[in-house]
Image (spheres, rainbow, N blue to C red):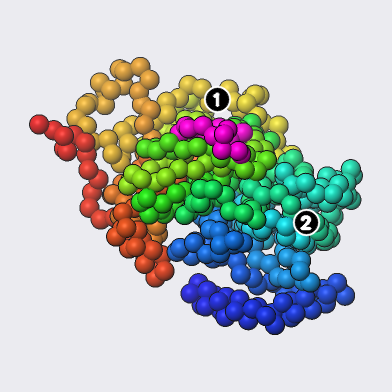
């Protein structure tokens, strides 16, 4: 990674003056049918420590944790991007992988970041086994660039390339996505940020972009069930908590969060310990006279919401969807008892049948599609008569109550907790307390508002790639406050 960063820096300095010419040659060569090398560009690395670098007008670049920026080359004043529609292996959390569909090796696709007034060209190549098209969500582009198959353009068949080109005259938080509905549910979306000609006022010091997605993954199967109406993996930028990379802010900085949603559910995104103002929508910047305070913003399907706040309170503040089932990982009927206490499902069915484990095909295969994941039919009848948890959580439940007494309490048990400090340790998690991961699940991340000294230490660790989990054992409230 260090190597590629270094060579990236070398390349981008090459692009200074002569590079413009060279890259335009590359593009025209491609038009003659030659293979175009991967474009290299002044894209910002995913882990660049301080994102106060210049977009147009000296603006802060947007940081999209866990998602790369899409590189570009220049061709006669046109910014040229390449997007390959393809299958991408995604690690939701350590130990849980899925095969989703995305762009150029990323789900969500790499972030496009341009300036108002830019002329942009997107060379979209379809590496999937079925046709696709690309829609530019919220952008005012000519109809033949709008990406709707049959209405505005022909399908991009497997192996084919389609070139989109237009001028962006808006600014704000937009996104691109496949215009085939079921492909959207496989992950085919990416952020499209357009910086304004005149910086917004007040200026922000940190600007983050977050893509909300949901997935239905049956046990033992790594391919999302796009027919499902309920979802058991909820992600921000392709990661579920606690694997989402925290957003790092220095105390006193002004912060913007840009959130987009393209799924089946709406997500009320809630921040702890702060109030924010909604300053933009999928239509761009909102006039200041319309701003109102809150700490929860509903990001509906197909919407974008920008929120801003002054990070005056030091702390590791949660930012998460507040739907309870969206604060969970791997919610699967019947699996709770197996996963948490090793005691097996209690319904009189066979273990594999009870868990929904499938041995042939996938969720949409001819064998399985009729039965799974649609909230009706045979396989949903088995899921009712079971508790969330068959025994005490092995992780944190260190109270002295007897299990037999607890089970007399209606509704018990409800807790689901898992500690993954070591597995998800990265420079951005430096200084978090032991067991911090225990209640980080689903569509959940942190805005870490750090005092200057801790902030600098985290930045150093990001630069040097130091990842250490917290040491010591979790503090038990009973011990802390016992008198
Ligand atoms: Cu949600």
Q: Quadrant of residue 397?
A: top left
- Which residue is found at the position 48% from the left and 21% from the top? 385
Whether 11 is drawn above or below 189: the answer is below
C-alpha span from label 2 to label 1 = 55 Å
Q: Quick check: 36 left or right of 443?
A: right
Element at label 2 = strand
Q: Position of residue 77 (x, y in %)?
A: 76, 69
Residue 84 in sight here: no
Q: Which residue is mark 2?
A: 167
Residue found at the far left of this picture: 483
Q: Which residue is mark 1?
A: 382
Instruction: Classify mark 2: residues with Cα within 10 Å, few (<14), some (14-19) or many (20+).
Output: some
Element at label 1 = loop
Q: Position of residue 95 (x, y in %)?
A: 47, 52
Q: Answer yes or no: do the residues labelled 2 and 1 have beta carbons within 8 Å?
A: no
- Of tags 2 and 1, the one toward the viewer is 2
The one of 293 and 262 positioned closer to us in this rendering: 293
- Which residue is found at the position 40% from the left and 57% from the top? 428
If the image is split into quadrants, where does the C terminus sit?
top left
Q: How many marks?
A: 2
The one of 159 and 342 positioned closer to us in this rendering: 159
Q: Quick check: 166 left or right of 244?
A: right
The magenta stretch spans residue 287: yes
Q: Position of residue 126 (x, y in %)?
A: 78, 58
Give, as a single range, the part of the protein colored magenta: 286-300
Among the two numbered marks 2 and 1 on one chain, the one whose residue lies closer to the N terminus: 2
The one of 46 and 454 positioned closer to us in this rendering: 454
Q: Position of residue 259 (x, y in %)?
A: 57, 43
Q: Quick check: 101 left or right of 256?
A: right
Instruction: Classify mark 1: residues with Cα within 10 Å, few (<14), some (14-19) or many (20+).
Output: some
């Amino acid at each position: 990674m260090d190597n590629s960063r270094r060579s990236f820096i070398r390349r981008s300095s090459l692009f200074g003056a002569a590079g413009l010419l060279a890259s335009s040659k590359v593009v025209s060569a491609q038009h003659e049918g030659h293979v175009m090398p991967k474009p290299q560009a002044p894209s910002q690395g995913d882990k660049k420590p301080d994102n106060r670098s210049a977009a147009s007008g000296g603006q802060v670049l947007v940081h999209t944790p866990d998602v790369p920026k899409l590189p570009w080359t220049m061709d006669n004043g046109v910014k040229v991007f390449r997007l390959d529609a393809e299958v991408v292996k995604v690690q939701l959390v350590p130990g849980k992988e899925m095969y989703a569909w995305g762009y150029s090796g990323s789900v969500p696709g790499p972030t496009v970041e341009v300036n108002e007034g830019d002329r942009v060209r997107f060379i979209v190549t379809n590496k999937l086994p079925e046709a696709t098209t690309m829609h530019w969500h919220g952008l005012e582009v000519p109809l033949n660039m709008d990406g709707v198959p049959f209405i505005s353009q022909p399908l991009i068949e497997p192996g084919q390339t389609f070139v989109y080109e237009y001028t962006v005259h808006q600014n704000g938080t937009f996104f691109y996505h496949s215009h085939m509905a079921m492909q959207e549910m496989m992950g085919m979306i990416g952020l499209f940020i357009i910086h304004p000609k005149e910086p917004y006022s007040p200026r922000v010091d940190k600007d983050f972009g977050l893509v909300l997605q949901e997935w239905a993954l049956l046990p033992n199967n790594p391919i999302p069930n796009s027919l499902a109406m309920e979802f058991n993996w909820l992600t921000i930028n392709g990661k579920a908590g606690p694997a989402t990379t925290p957003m790092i802010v220095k105390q006193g900085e002004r912060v913007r969060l840009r959130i987009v949603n393209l799924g089946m559910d709406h997500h009320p995104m809630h921040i702890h310990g702060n109030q924010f103002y909604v300053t933009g929508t999928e239509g761009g910047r909102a006039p200041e006279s319309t701003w109102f305070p809150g700490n929860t913003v509903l990001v509906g399907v197909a919407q974008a919401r920008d929120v801003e706040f002054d990070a005056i309170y030091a702390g590791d503040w949660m930012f998460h969807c507040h739907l309870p089932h969206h604060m969970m990982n791997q919610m699967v009927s019947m699996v709770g008892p197996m996963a948490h206490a090793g005691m097996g499902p209690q319904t009189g069915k066979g273990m594999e049948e009870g868990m929904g484990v499938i041995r042939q095909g996938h969720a949409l295969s001819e064998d399985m599609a009729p039965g799974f994941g649609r909230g009706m039919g045979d396989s949903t009848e088995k899921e009712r008569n079971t508790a969330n948890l068959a025994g005490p959580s092995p992780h944190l439940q260190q109270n002295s109550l007897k299990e037999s007494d607890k089970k007399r309490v209606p509704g018990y048990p409800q807790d689901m907790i898992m500690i993954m400090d070591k597995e998800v340790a990265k420079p951005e998690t430096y200084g978090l307390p032991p067991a911090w991961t225990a209640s980080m699940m689903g569509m959940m991340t942190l805005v870490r508002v750090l005092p200057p000294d801790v902030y600098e230490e985290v930045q150093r660790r990001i630069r040097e790639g130091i990842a250490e989990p917290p040491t010591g054992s979790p503090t038990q409230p009973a011990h802390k406050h016992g008198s």
